[in-house]
């Protein structure tokens, strides 16, 4: 033991910092406190570099000084220690100056073996010690060195992160080192340590009891007051949070950045159900992208990856997914007025107010290259590539000129229209097939011309309609026109010599009215008055249906463009600003809207296929399978979903597919079969169930060895599928059934976690049966354990279980969701219910990461419930799908980060990972200013919610 007042250490620990830092730290702490009364300083002084050395210009000298002042050396033996030059140097110094008698070894990793015959380590099997140094030590001090096996300590720290200092095995091993250092028997040391520990615990217990007695009265008196104060504070926070959510909703279009910041602040203050619901719907708030000067026109690249914005300052290319600026260029003093991409997206054309047309190579959007230019007109107003040809049409309100850009470095004029009447006309567009050109004339007419492959124009017909804007539909059979009278008109131009007026979209109240089609031709966006954009459903062009009105621009909208997927709409308005209340009016902005059809959407993405099963996600949530048409999609790890492979579907209503838990196999419902999807881009058929009827619903058990298959008019049948090439029939569950529910994709089966418990519809659907699969070894003997009845006249329509399997959720035909505790499968009991659904509950899904339940009804509404308190589920959000069809599937990803909702022809995705949603809202908005903060939170000090 160290002498009092002496500047020396009892032990010096030599170890590898890369491998044994944690082991050495635990070892040091335990040695210092071994056998020490609580009121005395450490019993042994242990040197370890991490706790005793500071910054130094000569680290080696400090180490040697510490070695010189130490009585014992403990080497932590491991392969990394054996390779460490510091460990080798420390052993060399010790042997040279103090011999090898007071050197001990703690074996923490690797191999260590002594050969008694050679009185040396077996170096063919030992890698935990440096051979040269140990051979030198054994020469100085012959004999078998002393070591203690600490590998268990290394393993426990790796697995659990820590080890209790009262661990009996740790105390025994540390005593092995303390005994020779203090010259006392190991048993005596352990006995003394245990006695001191017992006395300390008794003293602590007595002290705590006395303090508890003294504090009980004061605490009891204060708790009630504190509880009331806490409740009052929490209620105030809840009220402020709800108020911020309401404020954000009222300004979501006018001040989108501030709205996002307020939503984040609301959630930070209190996680109310209103705040959670608003966060999940946050994707419906438009993004604002800033340009250099007043924005004038926008265009998406054909693949949808790039958004080009023309402004007074030139061109800006944005990443269409993230909104980040990829490059900014142009800006020749005349201000870019319009832009257009070539069909392959490699060339971008820009036109300015001086009549110049410039062509840019944008194959690398981060470094565009100028190719060539021409000046065919004055004041370019419209640019349009003629389909996949090399022809570019240029309009200036007086005429249309055709440029051949086959060699983009030398554009050539190939044709032009005749000059129109004296009044200016606006709008010009080329049809997607490159055969037609439509242009507005100054006499409130639209002229349709044919475009030859050589670039010549010839008149075909004239429409009596205002001509502020003309746009062809993607299929080319419709033409939308708009004018200063505030009307937009749809024309059928299947026969361009005899156009037919199909419908009028009235009351837009705008002089210059841009319009835009989605690529599927089912939605039309029309600029309305006062900076608004009106969406129209034109699936039936003869009977357009008015959709949502998007507001927020501070001036008339001058340009609209849909991304190729139809889910993103970009709009600009001349002289617009990101926040009209701030001094930024000269700054131009592009607003980017998230839409689904003719509605603003809160979903972050949509897939063009629907019909989800109850297990549509692969492990980790990276892959999603849909069944109409059958397809695999990557939805995780990338900004936007990506199609991976098509799958066979034999049922007009949509196929049911379910992932096995390991993600390597897909089960199909019609016909019943198994597919190998280890490579999701190349599915391969495996097992077929030849003797089975064709069920419609399939659900995997949690370990992937059992598959439940439900037939529309029969019971639930179980299959053993541990070998996917040889499925084995396990029989049916008597009295079970599914009825017609299986046709809608609802699963009449729910496995209760990994408990070997199964919930199924009863045959009459007036109850739920619980079955214990009774697995013993490789055999199954299902036993019904309980029957959960429903109220009279109601039918069971949907099932789901909590992740751990102790809670069952049951939806019925009256719109009620009932929560059952099935911890004891023989005595299930109802805990609570919710009755907010306005129609039959068609689907239920439980979030695997948090107490959240999703329920869909036959009216298409999808509600999210907080079920942390099973006796009182609370609705937190209503997800709007904006589909004309009822919901056909609802599912959470295995990590709880996504929820997928399908209808007959699409699947929409929402982000449910609140942390990710908060990060996205912060990334897509400017920080809230101090003046804005005072406007909405005047009673709180300025504390921006986004770091």
Image (cartoon, rainbow, N blue to C red):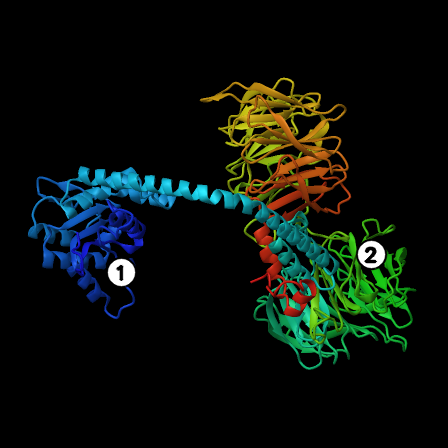
Query: Considering the image in quadrants, where does the C terminus appear?
Result: bottom right
Circle 1 or circle 2, nearest the eye: 1
Quarter occupied by residue 408: bottom right
Q: Is residue 758 visible?
A: yes
Q: Residue 221, how many percent across, how many down? A: 55, 45
Q: Nearer the viewer, residue 643 or 917?
A: 917
Residue 504 in the image: above or below residue 228: below
Q: Quick check: 650 left or right of 774?
A: right
Q: Nearer the viewer, residue 11 or 704?
A: 11
Q: Nearer the viewer, residue 631 or 618?
A: 618
Residue that badge 1 annotates: 52
Quarter occupied by residue 297: bottom right
Residue 202 in the image: above or below residue 282: above
Q: Residue at x 51, y 46 (%)?
A: 218
Number of other residues with Cα within 10 Å of mark 1, as a class: few under 14, some 14 to 19, many 20 or more: few
Q: Sequence order check: which comes first, mark 1 or mark 2?
A: 1
Q: Nearer the viewer, residue 8 or 564?
A: 8
Marks 1 and 2, how far apart at CA: 81 Å
Element type where label 1 sits in the image: helix
Residue that badge 2 annotates: 478
Quarter occupied by residue 655: top right
Q: Quick check: 205 left or right of 756?
A: left
Number of other residues with Cα within 10 Å of mark 2, as a class: few under 14, some 14 to 19, many 20 or more: many
Residue 443 in the image: above or below residue 120: below
Q: Residue 736, how many percent across, how many down? A: 65, 21
Q: Quick check: 462 left or right of 44?
A: right
Q: Residue 584, how many percent across, how many down? A: 69, 74
Q: Residue at x 70, y 60 (%)?
A: 286
The answer to whether the residue labelled 1 contacts the one labelled 2, judged by CB atoms less than 8 Å apart, is no
Element type where label 2 sits in the image: strand
């Amino acid at each position: 033991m160290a002498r009092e007042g002496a500047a020396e250490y009892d032990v010096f620990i030599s170890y590898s910092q890369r491998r044994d830092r944690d082991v050495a730290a635990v070892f040091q702490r335990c040695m210092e406190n071994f056998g020490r009364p609580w009121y005395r300083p450490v019993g042994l002084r242990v040197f370890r570099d991490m706790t005793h050395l500071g910054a130094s210009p000569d680290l080696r000298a400090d180490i040697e000084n510490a070695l010189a002042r130490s009585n014992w050396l403990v080497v932590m033996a491991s392969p990394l220690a054996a390779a460490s030059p510091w460990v080798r140097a420390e052993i060399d110094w010790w042997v040279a100056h103090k011999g090898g008698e007071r050197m001990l070894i703690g074996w923490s990793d690797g191999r260590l073996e002594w050969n008694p015959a050679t009185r040396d380590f077996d170096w063919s099997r030992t890698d935990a010690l440096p051979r040269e140094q140990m051979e030198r030590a054994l020469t100085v001090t012959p004999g078998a060195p002393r070591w203690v096996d600490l590998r268990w300590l290394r393993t426990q720290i790796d697995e659990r992160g820590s080890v209790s200092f009262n661990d009996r095995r740790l105390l025994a091993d540390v005593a092995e080192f303390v005994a020779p250092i203090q010259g006392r028997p190991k048993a005596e040391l352990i006995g003394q340590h245990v006695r001191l520990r017992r006395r300390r615990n008794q003293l602590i217990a007595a002290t705590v009891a006395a303090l508890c007695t003294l504090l009980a009265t004061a605490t009891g008196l204060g708790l009630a007051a504190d509880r009331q104060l806490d409740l009052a504070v929490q209620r105030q926070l809840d009220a402020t949070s709800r108020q911020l959510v309401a404020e954000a909703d009222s300004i979501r279009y006018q001040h989108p950045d501030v709205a996002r910041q307020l939503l984040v602040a609301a959630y930070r203050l209190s996680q109310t159900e209103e705040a959670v619901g608003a966060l999940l719907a946050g994707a419906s708030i438009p993004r604002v992208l800033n340009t250099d000067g007043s924005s004038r026109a926008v265009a998406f690249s054909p693949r949808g990856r790039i958004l080009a914005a023309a402004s007074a300052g030139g061109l800006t290319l944005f990443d269409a997914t993230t909104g980040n600026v990829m490059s900014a260029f142009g800006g020749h003093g005349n201000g870019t007025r319009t832009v257009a991409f070539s069909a392959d997206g490699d060339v971008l054309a820009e036109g300015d107010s001086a009549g110049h047309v410039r062509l840019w190579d944008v194959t690398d959007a981060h470094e565009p290259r100028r190719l060539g230019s021409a000046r065919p007109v004055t004041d370019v107003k419209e640019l349009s590539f003629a389909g996949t040809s090399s022809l570019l049409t240029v309009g200036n309100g007086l005429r249309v000129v055709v440029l051949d850009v086959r060699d983009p470095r030398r554009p050539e004029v190939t044709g032009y229209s005749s000059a129109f009447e004296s009044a200016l006309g606006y709008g010009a567009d080329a049809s997607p097939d490159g055969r037609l050109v439509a242009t507005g004339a100054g006499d409130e007419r639209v002229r349709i011309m044919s475009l030859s492959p050589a670039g010549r124009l010839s008149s075909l017909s004239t429409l009596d309609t205002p001509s502020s804007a003309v746009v062809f539909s993607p299929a080319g059979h419709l033409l939308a026109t708009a004018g200063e009278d505030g009307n937009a008109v749809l024309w059928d131009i299947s026969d361009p010599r005899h156009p037919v007026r199909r419908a009028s979209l009235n009351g837009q109240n705008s002089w210059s009215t841009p319009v835009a089609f989605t690529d599927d031709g089912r939605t039309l966006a029309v600029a309305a008055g006062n900076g608004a954009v009106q969406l129209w459903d034109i699936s039936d062009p003869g009977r357009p249906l008015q959709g949502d009105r998007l507001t927020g621009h501070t001036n008339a909208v001058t340009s609209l463009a849909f991304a190729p997927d139809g889910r993103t709409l970009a709009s600009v308005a001349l002289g617009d600003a990101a926040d009209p209340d701030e001094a930024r009016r000269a700054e131009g902005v592009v607003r980017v809207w998230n839409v689904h059809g003719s509605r603003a959407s809160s979903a972050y993405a949509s897939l063009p296929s629907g019909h989800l099963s109850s297990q549509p996600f692969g492990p980790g949530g990276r892959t999603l399978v849909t069944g109409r048409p059958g397809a695999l999609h990557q939805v995780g790890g990338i900004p936007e979903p990506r199609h991976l492979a098509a799958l066979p579907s034999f049922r007009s209503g949509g196929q049911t597919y379910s992932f096995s838990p390991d993600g390597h196999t897909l089960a199909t419902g019609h016909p019943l079969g198994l597919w190998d999807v280890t490579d999701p881009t190349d599915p391969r058929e495996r097992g077929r169930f030849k003797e089975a009827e064709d069920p419609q619903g399939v659900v995997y058990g949690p370990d992937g060895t059992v598959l439940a298959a439900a037939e529309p008019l029969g019971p639930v049948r179980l299959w053993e599928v541990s070998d996917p090439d040889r499925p084995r029939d396990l029989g049916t569950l008597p009295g079970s059934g599914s009825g017609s529910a299986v046709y809608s994709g609802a699963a009449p089966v729910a496995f209760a976690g990994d408990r070997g418990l199964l919930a199924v519809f009863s045959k009459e659907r007036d109850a739920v049966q619980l079955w214990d699969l009774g697995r013993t070894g490789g055999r199954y003997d299902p036993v019904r354990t309980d029957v959960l009845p429903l109220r009279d006249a109601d039918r069971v329509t949907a099932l789901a279980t909590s992740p751990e399997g102790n809670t069952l959720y049951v939806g019925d035909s009256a719109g009620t969701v009932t929560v059952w505790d099935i911890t004891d499968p023989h005595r299930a009991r109802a805990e609570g219910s919710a009755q907010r659904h306005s129609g039959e509950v068609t689907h239920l899904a439980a979030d695997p990461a948090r107490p959240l339940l999703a329920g869909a009804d036959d009216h298409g509404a999808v509600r999210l419930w907080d079920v942390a308190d099973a006796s009182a589920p609370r609705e937190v959000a209503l997800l709007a799908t904006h589909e004309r069809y009822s919901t056909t599937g609802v599912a959470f990803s295995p990590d709880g980060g996504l929820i997928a909702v399908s209808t007959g022809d699409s699947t929409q995705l929402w982000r449910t990972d609140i942390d990710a949603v908060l990060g996205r809202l912060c990334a897509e908005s400017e920080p809230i200013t101090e003046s804005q903060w005072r406007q909405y939170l005047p009673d709180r000090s300025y504390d921006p919610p986004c770091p």
